[in-house]
Image: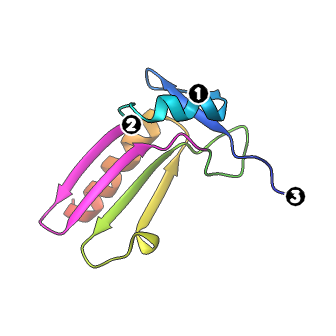
Amino acid sequence: MLAAMSHYILDGHEPKRTDPVAWQQWYESADRVVARTPIGPDIVISTVFVGLDLGCDPDRPLVFETEVMEAGIASVDARRERYPTWVEAQLGHAKIVSEYRGI
């Protein structure tokens, strides 16, 4: 049997576990963007707080996600990286931006 997905909100830049109702209310108006970087006309790298644990380790919930959105590539096929903290999400975003810029 699958466990219920854990919900999180941000307190500043800190993820805090919450219930689904509080999460939904917070999520509707929250600024969840960590970074967004266009790379030319056809690529955008976006890192956001998703507020759901997308990982398998309850002690290290993966609640941030970077997605590389490319023209002509379906979202399900997009490159994604996930992180447990705001700082790791910022660093991961910068690393992917550097890769795509060839730095």
Amino acid carrying label 2: it is Arg
Asked if residue 69 is positioned above or below residue 88 in the image, the reply reads: below
Which of discs 1 and 2 lies nearer the camera? The answer is 1
Q: Which residue is mark 3?
A: 1
The quadrant of the rendering that contains the N terminus is bottom right
Residue 77 locus on image (x, y percent): 44, 74
Residue 14 locus on image (x, y percent): 51, 25
Asked which quadrant contains residue 41, the reply is: bottom left
Please tell me which residue is depicted at 27% across the width and 79% down the height of the picture. Answer: 72
Q: Main secondary structure of the magenta part?
A: strand
Asked which quadrant contains residue 7, the reply is: top right
Q: CA distance from mark 3 to mark 2?
A: 31 Å
Amino acid carrying label 3: it is Met
Q: Which residue is mark 1?
A: 22
Q: Would residue 3 be found to the left or right of residue 21 on screen? A: right
Q: CA distance from mark 1 to mark 2?
A: 15 Å
Please tell me which residue is depicted at 27% across the width and 70% down the height of the picture. Answer: 70
Q: Which residues are magenta?
A: 33-52
Instruction: Mark 3: give few (<14), some (14-19) or many (20+) Cα within 10 Å.
Output: few
Instruction: Mark 2: give few (<14), some (14-19) or many (20+) Cα within 10 Å.
Output: some
Please tell me which residue is depicted at 58% across the width and 44% down the height of the picture. Answer: 52
Residue 22 locus on image (x, y percent): 59, 27
* Element class at badge 2: loop
Q: CA distance from mark 3 to mark 1?
A: 25 Å
Q: Residue furthest top?
A: 12
Q: Which residue is mark 2?
A: 32
Please tell me which residue is depicted at 21% across the width and 59% down the height of the picture. Answer: 103
Amino acid carrying label 1: it is Ala
Counting residues from the N terminus, which is met first, the one under dot 1 or under dot 2? 1
